[in-house]
Amino acid sequence: MESLKLLIIGIVQGVTELLPISSSGHILIFSEILNISSSSLILTFFHVGTTLAILLFFREKIFKEILKKERITFLIKIIISSIPAALIGALFEDFISEKLRAIPITAISLIVVGIAMIIIERKSKKETEIEEVTWKQSLLMGVSQTFALIPGVSRSGITTLTGILTGLNKYIALEYSLILGIPILLGGFVWETLKLFFKDGQAIEFTTQNIFTGLIILLVPFCVGYLALHLLKKFKKSNWLTAFGIYRIILGVFLLLISL
């Protein structure tokens, strides 16, 4: 039964991490429904699969001609822009886990960012190349990631909106947002793994059940996430931010009603 619950959460993670509808918010909701933990550890491990999917999908944009000056500058830009959210996440980890992971907060975040999506989509510019993202645009998108520590905000959603407001095309902003998330998501995995292995001075014991559970947590979000990335390409010319914004508002209102 626990494996089935994790499978469901893995599918939800694979889809929602790559769409601007908040993976942490949806996992929190489904965790409540399925009565399963939504701790920072669980959320971080689920993020690994989708992060690997992003690496595979954008492998040419990330690794092609990696020793060229332009590519090195692009990667440095991504890493440095990820630092603010990483610092805030580490410093306020306990506060976020104990105070912010609540249905009403998630609901309000879904609604507020949903409204912003509908309004800001109209400001999207003509398409450019992802390598043309400036230092200013990258840093502002990186700083905006800190708001995604609040469940319901959506990391890809808030950074995409920030990218649009700084002059990027919405799809390029989304692409850059997904790549921008790689350092912080992988860094979070390393941080949580170190804490897990050395908790109480003892390394965790590997068992068949633990390995099976780990494979579910890794492979399901990876496979679903990779498929979701291919579907995202079809949204390129449609008003997909408005559609997701409406979905977020409906879901947020529903959550507020049931939490009363």
Image (cartoon, rainbow, N blue to C red):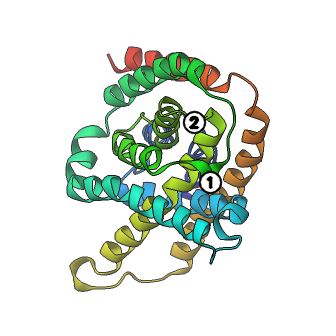
- Above or below, 125 relative to 154: above
| Residue at the spot of label 1 | 131
> Camera-side residue: 156 or 101?
156
| Residue at the spot of label 2 | 168
> Camera-side residue: 39 or 144?
144
Residue 162, label in figure: none
Q: Taking the image as drawn, is residue 23 in sight?
A: yes
Cβ atoms at labels 1 and 2 below 8 Å apart: no
Residue 246 lies, in percent from the top left, at 57, 17
Q: Secondary structure at mark 1?
A: helix
Q: Quadrant of the C terminus?
A: top left
Instruction: Residue at 26%, 53% (x, y): give it.
Output: 88
Left or right of 178, for residue 196: left
Residue 14 lies, in percent from the top left, at 62, 49
Residue 39 lies, in percent from the top left, at 36, 53
Instruction: Residue at 67%, 52% (x, y): give it.
Output: 225
